[in-house]
Image: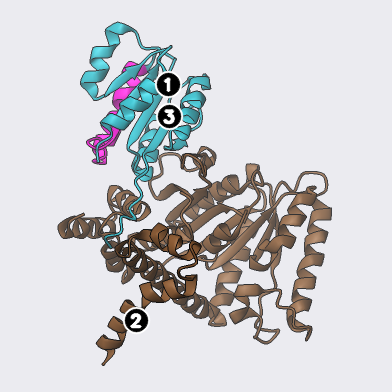
């Protein structure tokens, strides 16, 4: 039908991975994404990388936002990305990371496939604009 | 979406590729071009799954119960699909879909396919999308499909009606729940679950429910002409008493899995009952009839929208009516008549 009924909504998974109980940031970003008109799936705390992969694949999200404040990003983020690749879901999922990531780790994460890293103090609008601009599909 | 892409998705779903299934549901949700061909191609491969609808007020424990149900099904070697529907904001269209948080028992188990969907404010579209998503999960080969939704309105009632068995969750000690039941949810339940049965007031809730369900039976068998069963009355109400299903009440504590075995037993009983009484086929027919009508309505409405645009849009027509140059009936006829003529012409 040519009536333009198509409804395009950006779907995001906001994920907390590993032993990291700090989810205030994840909650704030989930709400901001919601208010930007996105559909946000929140993973809940202490998820294993496989769970994040399972959720990202099944929910067919456009954006995977991983929130990490534990310092384990060098291990966990690449594991998640490998999992996405295994299911052929990496190419069209925009992976972004939020939290505490030292400058010297950024290049490695980006090389592993992270599109952007948002540290503390990033204006909400910046993250939202980034997502809007870079979502594939 | 190209024809080849649709074929790829169909092949992927039938081959059991999770990614293809996920993408198929997205295509359905977005109503991307080609989604109709996709669902049409999948339809022939359906009919293998038992569909359970779970509804109840927010916080009643739906997601937790669904998680435990899925776990039990998996223990029995069955594959499971879950569709969890959450409301979306009427202002921004955004939504936080939180049901997944409770799915803790099936970590990393890809044979539980859990999908969150938002209502997206589509008029009547939600049940179409969930119905089509069920088709996809069914064609994929899931043995059990659970649809979970907040029982807060007609939209949700439509959604659970796509299920073979409808479970209504009630939590103890809340008068508001009773209000909700009065408002219409009572009629659609095949099984009532009093969750959090370890809480104070559970026994009262059970007896309240029993009383109300008793009244519901009375209303259908009596000659009072009060059709308590509403839209579901087609099968149930007209049957003999022996054939009618007596809604059951099950007590559970979903957080620690208590009563879930019992619930599964009751769900199986209900499905067996549907099968024995041919109610299963009847419900399926009702469902398809409704689906066909719904598609026809939506397509006809779209056709009319195009036609409206050709007449200069609704505003131009409203101007005429408001200026008393014309009236709504005449205007409607003017838009519709050419279409009616066309149909007439084709028929001959």
Question: Is B58 covered by the magenta stretch?
Answer: no
Q: Residues within 10 Å of mark 1 (few under 14, many from 20)?
A: few
Q: Which of pointers 1 and 3 indicates the residue nearer the eye?
A: 1
State which chain disc 2 sits on. B
- In the image, residue B295 sits, relative to residue A111, either above or below, namely below
Residue B194 left/right relative to B339: right
Kindly identify the residue that appears in the image at 79 percent across and 58 percent down.
B206
Does dot 2 land on a helix, a strand or a loop? helix
Helix, strand or loop for the magenta stretch, by majority = helix
Residue B181 seen in this snapshot: yes
Picture quadrant of residue B221: bottom right
Q: Are marks 2 and 1 on the same chain?
A: no
Which residue is disc 1 drawn over? Answer: A124
- Name the residue that disc number 3 marks: A15
Magenta-tinted stretch: A73-94
Where residue A62 sits: x, y (%)?
32, 37
CA–CA distance in space, label 3 to label 2? 54 Å
What is the x, y in percent for residue B81? 44, 54
Name the residue that disc number 2 marks.
B340
């Amino acid at each position: 039908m040519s009536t333009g009924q198509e409804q395009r909504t950006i779907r995001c998974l906001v994920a907390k991975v590993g032993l990291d109980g700090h989810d205030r940031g994840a909650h704030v970003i989930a709400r901001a994404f919601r208010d930007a008109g996105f559909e946000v799936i929140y993973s809940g705390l202490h998820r294993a990388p496989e769970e994040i992969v399972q959720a990202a694949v099944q929910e067919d999200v456009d954006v995977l936002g991983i929130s990490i404040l534990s310092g384990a990003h060098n291990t966990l983020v690449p594991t998640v990305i490998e999992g996405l690749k295994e299911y052929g879901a990496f190419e069209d999922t925009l992976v972004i990371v939020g939290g505490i990531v030292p400058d010297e780790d950024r290049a490695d994460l980006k090389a592993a496939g992270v599109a952007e890293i948002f540290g503390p103090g990033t204006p909400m609008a910046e993250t939202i604009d980034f997502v809007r601009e870079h979502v594939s599909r | 979406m190209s024809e080849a892409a649709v074929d790829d998705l169909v092949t992927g779903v039938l081959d059991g590729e999770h990614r293809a299934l996920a993408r198929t549901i997205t295509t359905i949700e977005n109503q991307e071009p080609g989604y109709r061909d996709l669902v049409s191609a999948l339809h022939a491969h359906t009919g293998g799954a038992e569909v359970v609808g779970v509804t109840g007020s927010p916080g009643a424990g739906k997601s937790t119960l669904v998680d435990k149900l899925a776990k039990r099904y998996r223990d029995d070697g069955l594959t499971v699909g879950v569709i969890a529907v959450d409301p979306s904001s009427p202002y921004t269209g955004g939504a936080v879909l939180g049901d997944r948080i409770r799915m803790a028992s099936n970590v990393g188990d890809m044979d539980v396919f859990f999908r969150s969907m938002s209502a997206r404010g589509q008029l009547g579209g939600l049940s179409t999308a969930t119905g089509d998503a069920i088709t996809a999960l069914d064609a994929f080969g899931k043995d059990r499909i659970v649809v979970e939704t907040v029982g807060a309105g007609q939209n949700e009632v439509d959604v659970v009606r796509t299920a073979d068995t409808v479970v209504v969750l009630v939590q103890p000690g809340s008068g508001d729940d009773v209000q909700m039941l009065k408002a219409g949810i009572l009629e659609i339940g095949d099984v009532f679950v009093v969750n959090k049965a370890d809480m104070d007031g559970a026994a009262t809730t059970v007896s309240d429910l029993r009383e109300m369900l008793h009244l519901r039976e009375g209303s259908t068998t009596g000659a009072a002409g009060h059709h308590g069963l509403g839209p579901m009355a087609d099968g149930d109400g007209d049957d003999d008493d022996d054939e009618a299903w007596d809604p059951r009440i099950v007590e559970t504590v979903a957080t620690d899995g208590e009563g879930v075995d019992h619930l599964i037993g009751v769900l199986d009983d209900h499905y067996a009952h549907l099968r024995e009484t041919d109610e299963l086929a009847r419900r399926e027919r009702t469902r398809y009839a409704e689906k066909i009508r719904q598609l026809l309505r939506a397509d006809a409405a779209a056709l009319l929208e195009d036609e409206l645009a050709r007449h200069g849009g609704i505003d131009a027509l409203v101007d005429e009516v408001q200026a008393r140059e014309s009236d709504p009936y005449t205007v409607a006829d003017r838009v519709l008549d050419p279409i009616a003529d066309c149909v007439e012409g084709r028929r001959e």
